Image (tube, grey):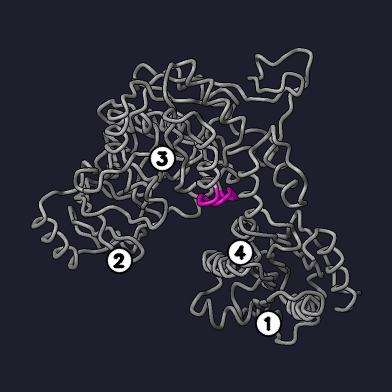
Amino acid sequence: MEAGVNPVQDDRARYPLILSDVNLIDDYKSRAHELPTITLTHRQLCDIELLLNGGFAPLRGFLNKADYESVVENMRLSDGTLWPMPITLDADRQFVESLQSGQEIALRDTEGLLIAILQAEDIWSANKKREALGVFGTLDDSHPGVTYLYHHVKEFYIGGRLLPIALPHHYDFNHLRFTPVDLREIFSRLGWKKIVGFQTRNPIHRAHQELTLRAAKQAGANILLHPVVGMTKPGDIEYYLRVKCYEHVLKKYEPHTTLLSLLPLAMRMGGSREALWHALIRKNYGCTHFIVGRDHAGPGKNRGGHDFYEPYAAQQLALEYQDEMGIEIIPFQEMAYSKKKLRYFPLDEFPADDTPATISGTQLRDSLQHNQEIPEWFSYPEVITELRKAYPLKHQQGFTVFLTGLPSSGKSTLANALMFKLRELTGRQITLLDGDEIRTHLSRGLGFSQQDRETNITRVGFVAREITRHGGIAICALVAPYKRARDMARQMISEVGGFIEVYVSTALSVCEARDRKGLYKKAREGLVKQFTGVTDPYEPPLAAEIEIDTANLGPVEVVETMIKKIKLLGYI
């Protein structure tokens, strides 16, 4: 925020959809105890906050079926209003089948706080293929939006208007959490007539600052730094560190020119569509101009190593619709530093006699993890200090060793031996998560269907993530036959530390010969159903960090091989 600016304190004055009649609110709260309840996910909480505070105007609830289908197909609500992103409330079959037509539903946060009551209008089965192709233009689940849609969104959608009760509560950075009403009042008080909004999900560096200054000069406007602090791309730096970076950089702008405010948005990484969505949201927050950069809201590369979207497609689409949206789009190329001129230029204006200097996100992470110097032309020292907290040296990071392979391939023996060896070599806390013990305790009650197996791996991944996050070492030994589930665990854990996949590639015949429990025999006799390697497939890892065949090697030799690789990766 800018010095001297205070948010409005009365919630009912700040949020246009929040009820002002206290007696009516009490009546709704009392009624809600008798209603079916949905506990909102992180993404749903982000969505409902922007539905209630006006950030998603003109929406007043989760999309009904007609609006949803029109948005997916045409980027418009059924009345023709431009709106490019489906805002949906999903639920599973069991919950939906318990509902009656037109029933009200209590929407609560994870602590049980009543946020709103949904007046259900439509319930329909989600066509995820149609939505993925319409919104993201792909079925490739390496796209984070597609991954979320297919693996986290439930089978049915419920649409309807909201009876708002309260807003999701935040415990941090409340001095930076301004609503559309707040910002419009602040802009009016400051006498700002033109405001250019800047969107990012990443830490801010000098190139970003230069871009915003150029855009403000071009538009004759003040600047709203409006970073996303809801859901972003998996693997992004956690928002609290990014916000601290913004607070440092805010001090580098001229006084009374720039405002910092946080946006609780759950991004979909939808490229061009998302650029339109971001612009509409910024208009609701009082911006007159909006910066759309290269590959705006793009998720990066697909499985084939190619960008999902053309680099300037988002700019072209946003410019096409800017008049209808009522906000002016400022397109910018990537910024690069000239060491000869000692300043930044857009690539299309870069001096012909010099080579553009840039540092990619991967290069930055590598430099941070190896304690290498970051040039001051790239970022401010205060920002780099904050980022070093997110990227400690590798030998100071927590990590997970994830052993996967057929039953009786030797995973548990190797995991146990590795645990003792790591205890000898390090002083860190080490936790062994063995498949049999997990099934007895953490995942009791789960079967062996693909869905239950993926749930089991997700649970193990969550525990390993927390161990890794806090600097410990997690050793997981599971069959984990499905690549998708293993990839989900990798993604989850890699956000907070190291992930080392060990493929124990012992042949099926060897595993069957050493099977002490006789499960292979029982499976072949039809006495055990859904047994990996006999009645269920095993999908071998294609790019494991370590591959081990225990047929001709003893545990001591194998563990030494794993230790060498872990040292080579820099974790010990």
Three-letter code for the amino acid on which mark 4 is drawn = Arg
Say which element carries label 1: helix
Mark 4 or 1: the one toward you: 4
**Which residue occupies 85% across, 78% down?**
555
Q: CA distance from mark 2 to mark 3?
A: 31 Å
Q: CA distance from mark 3 to mark 1?
A: 63 Å
Which residue is denoted by mark 3 in the rendering?
1
The C terminus lies in quadrant:
bottom right
Q: What are the residue bounds of the magenta stretch?
A: 234-241
Q: Is residue 344 above or below residue 487?
A: above
Say which element carries label 4: helix
Mark 3 or 1: the one toward you: 3
Three-letter code for the amino acid on which mark 1 is drawn = Leu
Q: Earlier in the sequence, mark 4 or mark 3?
A: 3
Which residue is denoted by mark 4 in the rendering?
469
Residue 519: mark in rendering: 1
Q: CA distance from mark 4 to mark 3?
A: 30 Å
Q: Is residue 475 above or below residue 242?
A: below
- Whole-percent x, y for residue 494 in the image: 64, 56
The prevailing secondary structure element of the residues shown in magenta is loop
In the rendered structure, are the residues bearing label 2 and label 1 in contact, judged by CB atoms less than 8 Å apart? no
Residue 112: mark in rendering: 2
